[in-house]
């Protein structure tokens, strides 16, 4: 008979080729394969009863994960940045004074956005990785129409103390609108929009809710809904139209309805537990990565750590760490410019549970061992497991 | 506005609801999600050039994973049992004497099958979990037309010493045909069909090659191919017809062509490394589970351990262990009757790598801790990680 040869298969002797791929970035995140199958269902039309039911149920899920039943959940077909723009232009009058308080890439982005859109922007910028000081923010908020702030700063791994910042800022300026980038804190970190007197909360589909990118979420307080007005300078991001439509299960624009239905799958586990349980578990998973990193000689880049991402300063070159992880099939990311050489980032935000997290600690330990670091075998895994059982 | 409520979502306080499902059974196994997407591609017809290319490439992959280029790989749309029957009736003359050597469920099944099919069956049965003795098998093989033997006994976790058994049996009886159930050893354990002078090797799609169930594989030695004759008592399992068809990329019967194409995806990683690397890695993963089990007071059920499955005798009731794992989202299985209360079984055969295996050790440790066992936290995870780094 003819000899059969396996196709290309350039044989490599390392068992690393048997490792499966893992997406460890702080978004887009690893997704539940069932979510992907939901996306692949036969295409439905978005102006139908079944689509309306999907939109209404997705809104209910998003609302449940916000923990503020009186707030309005809006689903936009855009990235989180689009959703932030929608909130900004729909709530803050043209040309108004806005304060952007930031200590990282995403905070800076909102200042740039507001500036581009014609707002008079005051920037309160702290070094990347620092936590914003509530008193300082409150002081700067006087005379401002709005405060733009990032809750979990994905570029640095910092979680700003939004409860205290909002409380002091509102006390200093009761008319202040607080617009919160909760892109990586929503459904991950403690977030109490009603209790903290926030006005708008923004997130996206490829982070805590574990879907693919493509949807932005805007959550509006009841008073923010009242404030919505027509704005002649925008059309697609008209949240007044969206509120009217989405309450009926419609959307003002053609929605990425497959992604919306995917949310029903990806949030199924998340809404099965109280928010406090979800937050505690996510914090524990991230703490396990930090503990593993610590055992390997890394320190957290941020002074106040977000559960959304372990941003670690390694004792070796960042690109070597990212490369060593990549050689093991795992996609981590470096810091964002200009801090790309200072830190690397790994996240358990997506479809990862405690056993996956334990595996990630093993990955980190292997990567550092492969870099020739004097790693005592077992330390990172043991530290992570201990943190997971704390 | 109307308050939105998340749909049913009976809230449970335990974070266990956030765990993802895991299929730890020794087949069907966890599959690569990409394999499932391959199955879901638009349906093709099986009498087309593209189907022929798929069949030929699948045969090449199967051949590469057998490591015997001169052997004939045949793909049947059946379970592994169907494939075993096909080999038996195609190679062994009606009514012939056959020896079935067994020490577990699957070995016993081949004796039952041969008896049903009208063969004169001699049963060499050892207690479940024991390893077959080569000299004893060789002695019993005198005067027999064929030896039916299971390489990796999935019901007990035993790996029989097929190299020595085959060598001694062929020496005792050079005309003996050796038909090997390699359902869970193929692409998992060291298997050298040409060197060991085997005549037929049988496996299936839902084990080492990591696909869903539905395909049986028969590998025939060159001399076995020569021996194939028409047999008036069977039609579907006519391997002579299959050889003629499959060499052209056809199949004599309608094939489960989607499953065949799925093989191309699920074997992609496996053929990227030398067989020795694959076998060594699979053995290491299973050794890690055994080490974790040992740290938790379990002992292996089998005297000679198969890398396909960790069959463990726990210090508590088996059904409690399986239940505790199920509460953590993981599907393990008990022993098969009549040993259902003696052991439980977990396997890394499927789409699991070393980091998944580490997570499985965490799962086992959690399960035993949840059962109230006096488990020192960390012991199972540390033992597994040590085994993975041995």
Image (cartoon, coloured by chain):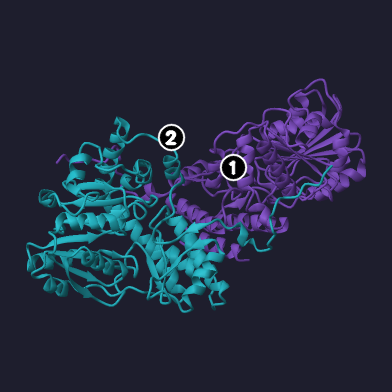
Chain colours: A cyan, B purple
Task: Tell me the number on the disc at residue A28.
Answer: none
Frontmost residue, B374 versus A32: A32
Q: Callout 1: 10 Å neighbours few (<14), some, many (20+)?
A: many
Q: Which residue in the protein does label 1 denote?
A: B342
* Chain containing mark 1: B
The percent position of residue B110, horizontal first and vertical second, equals 74, 33
Q: Is residue B367 left or right of residue B131?
A: left
To which quarter of the image does residue A284 belong?
A: bottom left
Q: Is residue A163 left or right of residue A307?
A: left
Spatial CA distance of label 1 from label 2 is 47 Å
Number of marks drawn: 2
Frontmost residue, B384 versus B252: B252
* Residue at the spot 92% in from the left edge and 45% down from the top edge: B171
The percent position of residue A209, horizontal first and vertical second, equals 34, 51
Q: Are marks 1 and 2 in contact (CB under 8 Å)?
A: no
The percent position of residue A252, horizontal first and vertical second, equals 24, 42
Which is more foreground, mark 1 or mark 2?
A: 2
Q: Is residue B123 visible?
A: no
Position of A302 relative to B82 (above/below): below
The percent position of residue B73, horizontal first and vertical second, equals 76, 41
Q: Dot 2 lies on which element?
A: loop
Task: Tell me the number on the disc at residue A42.
Answer: 2
* Residue at the spot 63% in from the left edge and 31% down from the top edge: B45
Position of A86 relative to B259 (above/below): below
Position of A65 relative to B229 (above/below): below
To which quarter of the image does residue B230 belong?
A: top right
Q: Is residue A223 visible?
A: yes
Q: Is residue B112 left or right of residue B373?
A: right
**Quadrant of the frame with the N terminus of chain A:** top right
Q: Callout 2: 10 Å neighbours few (<14), some, many (20+)?
A: few
**Quadrant of the frame with the C terminus of chain A:** bottom left
């Amino acid at each position: 008979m003819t000899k059969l040869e396996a196709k290309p298969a350039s044989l490599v002797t390392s068992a690393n080729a048997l490792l499966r791929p893992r997406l460890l970035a702080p978004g887009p995140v690893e997704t539940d394969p069932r979510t992907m199958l939901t996306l692949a269902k036969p295409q439905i039309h978005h102006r139908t009863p079944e689509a309306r039911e999907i939109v209404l149920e997705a809104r209910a899920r998003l609302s449940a994960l916000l923990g503020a039943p009186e707030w309005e959940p809006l689903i936009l077909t855009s990235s989180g940045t689009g959703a932030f723009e929608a909130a900004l232009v729909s709530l803050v009058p043209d040309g108004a004074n806005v304060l952007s308080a930031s200590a990282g890439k995403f905070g800076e982005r909102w200042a740039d956005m507001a500036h581009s859109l014609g707002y008079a922007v005051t920037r309160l910028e702290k070094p990347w990785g620092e936590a914003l000081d509530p008193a300082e923010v409150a002081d700067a908020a006087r005379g401002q129409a709005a405060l733009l702030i990032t809750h979990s700063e994905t570029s640095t791994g910092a979680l700003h103390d939004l409860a205290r910042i909002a409380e002091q800022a509102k006390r200093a300026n009761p008319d202040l609108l607080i617009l919160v980038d909760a892109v990586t804190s929503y459904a991950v970190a403690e977030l109490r929009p009603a209790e903290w007197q926030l006005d708008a909360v923004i997130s996206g589909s490829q982070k805590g809710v574990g879907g693919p990118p493509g949807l932005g979420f805007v959550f509006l307080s009841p008073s923010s809904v009242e404030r919505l007005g027509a704005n002649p300078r925008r059309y697609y991001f008209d949240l007044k139209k969206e509120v009217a439509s989405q309450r009926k299960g419609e959307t003002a624009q053609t929605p990425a309805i497959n992604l919306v239905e995917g949310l029903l799958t990806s949030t199924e586990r998340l809404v099965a537990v109280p928010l406090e349980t979800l937050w505690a578990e996510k914090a524990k998973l991230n703490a396990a990565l930090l503990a593993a990193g610590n055992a390997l000689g890394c320190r957290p880049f941020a002074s106040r750590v977000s559960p959304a991402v372990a941003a670690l300063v390694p004792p070796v070159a960042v690109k070597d760490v990212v490369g060593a992880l990549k050689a093991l099939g795992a996609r981590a990311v470096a810091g964002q410019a200009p801090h790309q050489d200072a830190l690397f980032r790994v996240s358990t935000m997506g479809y990862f549970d405690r056993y996956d997290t334990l595996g990630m600690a093993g990955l980190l330990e292997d990567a550092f061992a492969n870099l020739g670091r004097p790693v005592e075998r077992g330390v990172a895994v043991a530290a992570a497991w201990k943190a997971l059982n704390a």
